[in-house]
Image: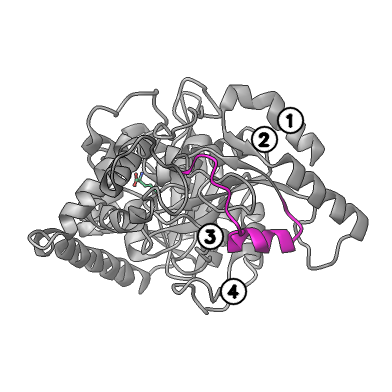
Amino acid sequence: TQATLDHIKATDDRYEAFITLMETNALEQAKKIDQAGVSSAQMLAGIPFGIKDNMVTKGVQTTAASRMLHDFKPIYDATVLERLSQAGAIGVGKLNMDEFAMGSTTETSYYKQTKNAWDQTKIPGGSSGGSAVSVAAGQVPFALGSDTGGSIRQPAAFNGVVGLKPTYGRVSRWGLIAFASSLDQIGPITRTVEDNALVLNAIAGYDARDQTSSKQTVPDFTANLTGNIKGMKIAIPKEYFGDGVDPKVVSVVKAGIAQLEALGAHVEEVSLPHTKYGVAAYYILGSSEASSNLQRFDGIRYGFRAENVQTLEDLYVQTRSQGFGDEVKRRIMLGTYSLSAGSYDAYFKKAAQVRTLIADEFEQVFGQYDLIVAPTTPNIAYGFGENQDDPQVAYMNDALTIPVNLAGLPGMSINAGFIDGLPVGMQLIGNRFEEAKIYQAAYAFE
Ligand code: GLN
């Protein structure tokens, strides 16, 4: 643990992945394990890990990369952190992200600009940018991220690591600062598929404190790591290889698919025709939920409070004007508008209907196939400030990850190769609660 902390301190000027180090807590916990010894239940004893800064840590600043939560010290630990602690893992620090997880580049953080692990002139992806970089750069063996529309898989792709968004309901959201509650899910980012399965083993499972937590039994996710995928049926959705997807990305991912075929998988093309409506539906639904979830940041209960105000309303307005960044404000406005009486039917309701169509067409494909394989992102990591002027262009970057969240499915990004020294992610999508099949194929591929 000490060596990990020293290594982070020696390297983080270069990557700027961490917002807060948890030195005292981490060393104390390591000492306890040293003294008490390791029980057989502690599968991750002594393994250090990083935590995206939207998961609450008892007594340790938790910012969600927002000014609004500067210096906020929660009074409890998120369920995932309790479970990892029971497994013996040691949280060493809080990782940078887009403010309230809204973004795809980690550029909307109030605190710092995390750099891509492979090329520090490039964005790390986001919103779990700090998590993916800290793992790819070798600062920690694993990190937790959260994924609402791609925020685990996209930065994992841009940094060449393994990132899984579990099935909605598989992992407790208790203690995750909510962005869009019907889409958010916590998951592991690791360097290998096996590590990823081990971490999911530790964090998955029912939690009475999260009403959307599933009682579905949790298998041992390492059980299928045999290298054998003979006869596995894989669907390739043609819409994920079309317009707007960099042809170089297409060719790297197609080579990956050929490798799965060589390992004995049956590969066939399918169509998911509603894919093109995913982004529009997501930004209405996600922003609507965000506008509701973020009402709690009012300057009264906790977090930032504006000074020199005259009235209560002035306090709300000043606190929220100064505490939130531009992207967060944009989403609150979009969401509030979509939910308003005059717009609800035209926007929110329509988007919810599109969501059902997308979930239905996935379900049809999974009636016949084990997995869907596609690129994780339409492009590779790009320069800072690019795609910033027009939010709509930036939003299209999530076109290939968003449908998975809308349908509540599990999805993984795994490295498939490189273009000009930058990693390309291949996405494996499974049916609900079938993470084990994703791990099986990813392990064979790796
Ligand atoms: N980039 C997407 C957004 O900005 C997804 C973010 C996420 O998954 N948290 O909303």
Labels 2 and 3: the sequence-earlier one: 2
Query: Residues under labels 2 and 1: Cα distance?
Result: 9 Å
* Local secondary structure at mark 1: helix
* Residue linked to disc 3: 175
The answer to which of 177 and 185 lies nearer the viewer is 177
Labels 3 and 4: the sequence-earlier one: 3
* Residue linked to disc 1: 7
* Residue linked to disc 2: 138
**Quadrant (top left, top right, bottom left, bottom right) of the N terminus:** top right
Q: Is residue 223 above or below residue 246?
A: below
The answer to which of 436 and 295 lies nearer the viewer is 295
Mark 3 or 4: the one toward you: 3
- Please state if 59 lies on the left or on the right of 359 as rendered: right
Labels 2 and 4: the sequence-earlier one: 2
The answer to which of 288 and 376 lies nearer the viewer is 288
Is disc 4's CB within 8 Å of ligand 1? no
Query: Residues under labels 2 and 3: Cα distance?
Result: 27 Å
* Residue linked to disc 4: 218
The answer to which of 441 and 432 lies nearer the viewer is 432
The residue under label 2 is which amino acid type?
A: Gly
Q: Circle 4: is it few (<14), some (14-19), or many (20+) Cα within 10 Å?
A: some
Query: Residues under labels 2 and 4: Cα distance?
Result: 29 Å
